[in-house]
Image: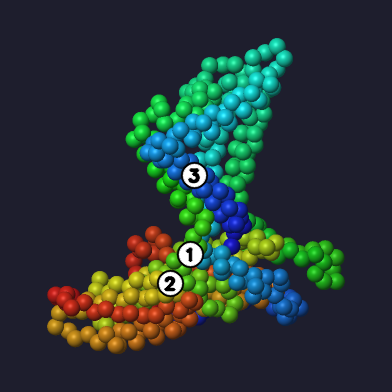
Amino acid sequence: MNGTPRILNRVLIGVLGIKLLAIGVLLILLATVPAVAVWWQGWSAGVWSLWRDLFERTRFPGRAESWLWIVVVLVLLLVIGAMVAWVAQQGKGRTNLLVFEEGPGQVPGNVRIGSGVAEQALRAALADRPDLAGVTVATYDFRGEPGLRIRLQPRQGVAPHRLAADVSALVEALDRALGKRTPVLIHIASGARSRFGRAERVR
Amino acid sequence: MRPNTEHDPNHGNDAPPAPSAAPTVGGEAPAGAGAGGMEEILRRETHSSRAVASIIAAVLVAGLCGYALLETAVRAIGQPPWLVDPQTAAEKVVSLPNGVSPLLLGVTGAVVVMAGLFFFLNAVLPGRRARHILRDRRAAVVVDDEVIASALARRARVAANVSQEQVMVTVSRQHVQVSVRPTSGVPLSPDAVLAAVQDELGDMTLSPSPDVRITVASTGVVGA
């Protein structure tokens, strides 16, 4: 439920994949089919001479270098910046406000409840359960509204539906305490701790 | 164990001094994200976000651009190139089949095709994760298939009265495969195990709901 831009990811990966596929196929064809080699040399020589002319025409007056190099540098910097921004978009969306209400009653002012309230309450309530190997609670901004993500790592053999029912009862208690229903995701996960830890033997 | 889990909701309930505030706001309808928001969350949680492939792609492109930037900057200020001058590089690319051995060219092409295929398939395939949705009245619940398998294996083990190592359960999107190796000399009823596993699955109310297949090995385990 984080804010990873999934469609953008797929589009950009797809564009890169198609380009790499085209380059790779061209390289293999160049290595194997002589006719392709002849076509490639003619076509790419034309493109290259076009660019060389462009560089010749854009020289600094009185110097050998073209100012097009500076443009190329700027474009490359822009692309690198865009890539860094793209990576920064992955997995974003953590927030630290669970409830934000403007003027909720007769008293002027607004109400803010930090996400630590729900996170610590749930973690404390689940802390001494013997059937859990780990609990993580985090608040994410989902479509402009805070939502809780509860990640549970049960020990081996724990029935997930009973665990989910217990935790959603806890969440309902939290709803009553906060006076607001927030979207909640419960993720019952397996990980190294549940895989290699001891099984819960007694129930 | 039971009293402990039963106790927890009460504990969480009476801890904050909220009863006075609860009736004023608690009766109101939930805000914004209702059923539609939940569906959206569940859809996102059961599909891969492609973050890893995206980060690999971004690092690759940024690295290539960084190298090109270095050579271009060196060229722009009139210094000797680091590895290859952009102009000679372009000329080499133009005369490509000549100057490089065909084997090297072919292998390079194959590697690039592989990388391209990786990214392209990552973009096109649905990317479902090995998770199931569990219906719950309050929260959106997703369960890793491994957790389901472990719970079913426990139930099957108790029903078959065998040890932990004799049961293997594999959960996929549509199927649950239970393999049991009986103890030598002890009869084992596959129907009872199947019924137990189906009963447990029915309690879970998974979506999509998988069907159960059971195989009992013809050879037994000695002394288990």
Please state which of residues B65 and A53 is positioned toward the viewer in this rendering: A53
- Distance of label 1 from label 3 (alpha carbons): 27 Å
Kind of element beneath mark 1: loop
Decide: is B157 above or below A26: below
Residue that carries the numbered disc 2 in the rendered image: B173
The image shows residue B170 at horizontal and vertical percentages of: 34, 71
Residue that carries the numbered disc 1 in the rendered image: B128
Residue at the spot x=70%, y=75% of the render?
Answer: B30
- Distance of label 3 from label 2 (alpha carbons): 34 Å
**Can residue A101 be seen by looking at this rendering?**
yes
The quarter of the image holding the C terminus of chain A is bottom left
Q: Is A55 displayed left or right of B51 in the figure?
A: right
Q: Which mark is residue A22?
A: 3
Closer mark to the observer between disc 3 and disc 2? 3
Q: Is B60 displayed left or right of A69 in the figure?
A: left
CB-based contact (under 8 Å), mark 1 and mark 3: no
- Check disc 2 and give the amino acid type: Arg
The quarter of the image holding the N terminus of chain A is bottom right
The image shows residue A117 at horizontal and vertical percentages of: 63, 64
Instruction: Classify 10 Å Cα crowding around label 1: few (below 14), some (14-19), many (20 and above).
Output: some
CB-based contact (under 8 Å), mark 1 and mark 2: yes
Kind of element beneath mark 3: helix
The image shows residue B64 at horizontal and vertical percentages of: 52, 35
Chain on which label 1 sits: B
